[in-house]
């Protein structure tokens, strides 16, 4: 059992809670009253503190701005039917955060700062958790290099923050996806499996071009043939072929190991559904669509949760789907939602009580 940290807290003098319209919550636009902050210096993490959400000051020479040493996570907190607050699978996010840190030559974050700090921060701002269906409190842990030097090397100093943002559905309608063949997100040996800021910055051009064509996001393909599917820009992807669900495997290190992805796979297998984690070629998807074998495509992610895909375009071939006929994706979403709401058992201890 993890010992409880005594984290110093400076409370806001006046909460901004009453200023927020909880019926209109665009993703990541509003932030709660408080944040957590911790600094790494002299080879160790210093005492974390919780303070009012505020502007932070730094020199323009900090290495995060110049060499991209910055990583982050996405976690969510919910309220169940009894009004109790829970965080969904934060230990899995901690493990992934430290995998990203290792790849980016950054220090790992201790469990007590990440988990206990998050728990206490959410507990302090628990009234910011929206009590509405498909709404949640998005939690953003982030770490970045703070050395003031222009030498190309790993930083010796870092800042860690946790921010809280009440949010509504990330994608409120079924999505249209464009299969990307020009730009590359990740290749073997790269940093595709790490949740580092550079991965997202590099994706913006392709996403903007897809949106100009009327699509919501891109489905990334491999760097060599642009045939092997990886992930959608903001989520992992699943294909339903008859009674089998297929999702791209993590073996090559080019895909983010999504916590929601793992949750979906686990729930599907618990329901007796066959799930294959393997390489999947876009030509296989096109062939299955032509034959009528492909019945559903959906995505999973912390922000997106479960998102239905109503259109997938590859070259000049467009696959369209009637998402109202989907059965597996809604079933998975219902199970995960009921678990978070306390209407269904949580046999694996995914929900960590605040």
Image: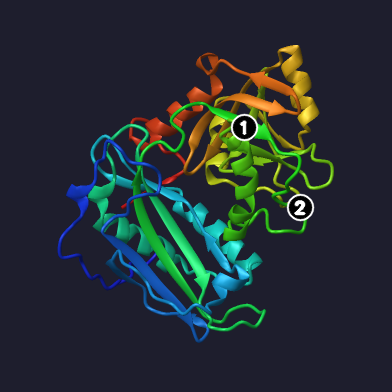
Work out how far the residue at label 2 is from the one at label 1, CA to CA, in angstroms: 26 Å
Q: Where residue 187 is drawn, which disc sits there?
A: 2
Helix, strand or loop status at disc 1: loop
Q: Which residue is mark 1?
A: 213
Could you say which quadrant of the image residue 197 lies in? bottom right
Total tally of numbered discs in the picture: 2
Residue at the extreme bottom of the image, as rendered: 42
Q: Nearer the viewer, mark 2 or mark 1?
A: 1
The mark that comes first in sequence, 2 or 1, is 2
Q: Position of residue 141 (x, y in %)?
A: 45, 60
Residue 23's place in the image compared with 51, above or below, is above
Q: In this view, which residue lies farthest toward the left?
A: 14
Residue 166 in the figure: left or right of residue 21: right
Q: In this view of the protein, which residue sits in the foreground, 34 or 333?
A: 34
Q: Is residue 156 above or below residue 128?
A: below
In percent of the image, x 44 and y 45: which residue is there? Answer: 350
């Amino acid at each position: 059992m993890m010992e409880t940290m005594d984290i110093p807290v400076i409370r806001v003098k006046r909460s901004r809670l009453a200023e927020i319209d909880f019926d209109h919550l665009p993703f990541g636009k509003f932030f709660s009253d408080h944040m957590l902050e911790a600094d790494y210096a002299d080879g160790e993490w210093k005492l974390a503190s919780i303070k009012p959400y505020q502007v932070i000051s730094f020199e323009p020479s900090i290495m995060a701005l110049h060499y991209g040493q910055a990583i982050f996570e996405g976690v969510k907190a919910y309220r169940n039917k009894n009004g109790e607050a829970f965080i969904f699978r934060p230990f899995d996010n901690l493990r992934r955060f430290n995998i990203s840190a290792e790849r980016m030559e950054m220090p790992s974050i201790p469990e007590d700062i990440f988990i206990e700090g998050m728990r206490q921060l959410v507990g302090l701002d628990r009234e910011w958790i929206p009590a509405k269906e498909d709404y949640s409190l998005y939690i953003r842990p982030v770490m970045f290099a703070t050395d003031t030097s222009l030498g190309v090397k790993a930083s010796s100093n870092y800042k860690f923050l946790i921010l809280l943002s009440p949010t509504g559905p990330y994608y409120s309608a079924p999505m249209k996806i464009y299969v990307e063949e020009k730009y590359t997100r990740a290749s073997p040996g790269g940093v595709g499996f790490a949740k580092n800021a550079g991965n997202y910055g590099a994706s913006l051009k392709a996403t903007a071009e897809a949106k100009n064509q009327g699509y919501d996001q891109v489905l990334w393909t491999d760097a060599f043939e642009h045939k092997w599917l990886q992930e959608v820009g903001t989520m992992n992807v699943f294909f339903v072929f008859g009674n089998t669900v297929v999702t791209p495997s993590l073996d090559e290190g080019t895909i983010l190991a999504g916590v929601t992805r793992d949750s979906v796979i686990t729930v599907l297998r618990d329901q007796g559904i066959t799930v294959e984690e393997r390489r999947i070629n876009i030509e296989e998807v096109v062939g299955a669509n032509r034959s009528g074998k492909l019945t559903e495509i959906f995505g999973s992610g912390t922000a997106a949760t479960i998102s239905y895909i109503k259109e997938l375009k590859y070259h000049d071939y467009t696959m369209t789907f009637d998402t109202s006929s989907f059965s597996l994706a809604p079933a998975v979403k219902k199970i995960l939602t009921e678990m978070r709401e306390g209407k269904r058992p949580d046999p694996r201890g995914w929900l960590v009580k605040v």
